[in-house]
Image: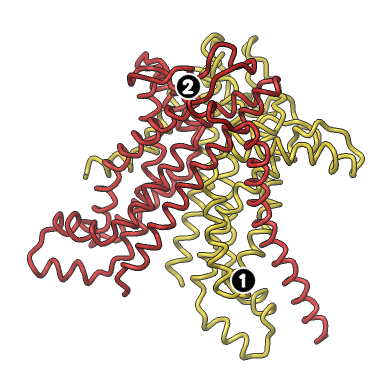
Chain colours: A yellow, B red
Amino acid sequence: MIIGLVIVILLPFILGIGLYIKSILLLEDQSLFQLLFSGDWRPLSGKFGFLPFIISSVWVTTIALMIAGPICLLTAVHLTQYAKPWVLKLMQPVIDILAGIPSVIFGVWGILVIVPFISDYLAPFLGKQTSGYSIIAGAIVLAVMVIPFILNILIEVFKTLPDELKEASLSLGATKWQTIKLVLLRKAFPGVISAFGLGVSRAFGETIAVLMVVGNVASIPKGLFQPGYPLPALIANNYGEMLSIPLYDSALMLAALVLFVVVMLFNMGSRFAISRLEEKV
Amino acid sequence: MRKFRHIEEKFFRVLMFLSTSIIVISLSVIIFSILHKGLPSLSWEMISQTPKGGFYFGKEGGILNAIVGSLYLAIASTILALIIGLPVALMMNVHLVKYKKLVDSIRFFLDLLWGVPSIVYGAFGFSVMIYFGLKTSLLAGILTVTLFIIPIMVRAMDEVLKTIPRGLMETAMSLGSTSSEISYRIYLRQVISGLITAVLLSFGRAIGDAASVLFTTGYTDHIPTALNQPTATLPLAIFFQLSSPIPEVQNRAYASALILTIIILFISILSRIFSQKYQKNRIKN
């Protein structure tokens, strides 16, 4: 029992240290700043600039959250405040199934539906040309993937709000929407932000589904309809050849370490805020 | 002014309804498009044979190797995670229940681990493998996936165990049971169907994850007969077949995706049945 417990507690440290030890070779060779902010990615000549991948990751994640965020917030309010209980009961399996679908299936769906939709309808509609394999395709697929995740947390957040708050506001003559907007959303604000934070960390690390639709071109993306190359895709695509080029494996482990640290920071912040919120209510 | 606030409310109610529908529609579109593309190429041959020569050029064969490989991998790592995870979850809720701060920080750690992307586990597993000079194998995959699903399983079980009223434990204590007796004789029996749901959830994660096995299990056309052999998995089979330029092979990828989706849906129905059973037997506070 205690051994199991120790494993669980030490695991994040072991993960972090393990990746750090592997990436230290590259860090001794080049400075971290140079690695993170250079756009020059030529592994064969020992140039490892992570900027294109970091920017792609940031783009894909931000847009995914911009799509998923409002949808989740509105749905969570709808399900907890307006809808009849049976609607929530009906939606629960929908959310659970969506959360359980493996990421590779989302990728297949992206290729089947989202990519053609973008190249045939969305891009021409906006006067752009694209193959469809683009930042925006990755973001849409990612948005659908993080929706169940964020939504579940938001529903929990709204459920923890005390009913008295709502009743007090309604008895003062506010409409239901005014109560939601001015009382409930304000009270739930930290919870909403942390739910989004957890969504960010989930989206940032998602690999296969994004990899399949995002295009994978190692240059800084100039627009939403251009292909991108996020960090997880970089790691997944190059594992085969990384042992034949010096320092390459070290560079990929550094990419994994960057991913790990960013996700951990977002997770820690959000979880901390949520636990504070639960204590207060 | 009065009118405006009602219009505003109407407007947002429509938006809310739309967002809820978007979620339902997305799920239906996903399942429908996989069914639509996968069903025509799905055949008995697909699920009963391993790839024959020329399989990746559209010739005969199936993906039995990937189906069996995925099942081996997922079952073994779920069992391993259960062996490590169940005592941890029970300990958190029985032995350590007095130390609330400690249990809360363990939960915090587990939540953090749950959020770590599977590709990080994959990369970590790979670097450990290189360190020990191991090749891609079923064993390496099992160990990596086990690490990956332990936090999920422990946390899901913990959520179930948390719902047991404290009174049950106090009663058992007053009758002279030890903490371990309470854990394994009373708590375990009380929430067994809830725990099965947690196990099924982890199993679904294990069978569907591609990024963690990409580095560690490798890929092969044969069904593995020993732990040190590379193993094919369903998500990777889908991924590799889909990147082929040949339409027949791509169609097989859709059929493989359908097989994986059916497995996942089956697991999710099963876990729903168990969770309903658990809700029925549950002692209310």
Residue in view at x 59 percent, y 58 percent: A193
Please, which chain is the residue tagged with disc 2 on?
A
Foreground label between 2 and 1: 1
Is any atom of residue A190 visible in this view?
no
Q: Quadrant of residue B129?
A: top left
| Circle 1 residue | A186
Return the mark for residue A79: none
> How crowded is the residue under tag 1: few (<14 C-alpha within 10 Å), some, or many (20+)?
few
Instruction: Sort mark 2 into few (<14), some (14-19) or many (20+) by Cα contacts within 10 Å.
Output: some
Q: Quick check: A274 left or right of B275?
A: right
Disc 2 marks which amino acid? Ile
- Tag 1: amino acid: Arg
Residue A128 visible in image: yes
On the same chain: label 2 and label 1?
yes
Quarter of the image where one finds residue B61: top right
Q: Which mark is residue A24?
A: 2
Quadrant of the image containing the C terminus of chain B:
bottom left
Q: Is residue A163 above or below residue A149?
A: below
Precedes in sequence: disc 2 or disc 1 = 2
Instruction: Name the one closer to the observer, B214 or B267.
Output: B267
Q: Nearer the viewer, residue A256 or B201?
A: B201
Residue B1 in picture, x, y percent from top left: 83, 85
Question: What's the residue at 40%, 63% (across, down)?
Answer: B276
Q: Is residue A208 above or below residue A38?
A: below
**Which type of secondary structure does the marked residue at label 2 adopt?**
helix
Q: Secondary structure at mark 1?
A: helix
In this view, which residue lies farthest toward the front? B44
Q: Residue at x 24, y 52 (%)?
A: B91
For residue A240, what is the image quadrant?
top right
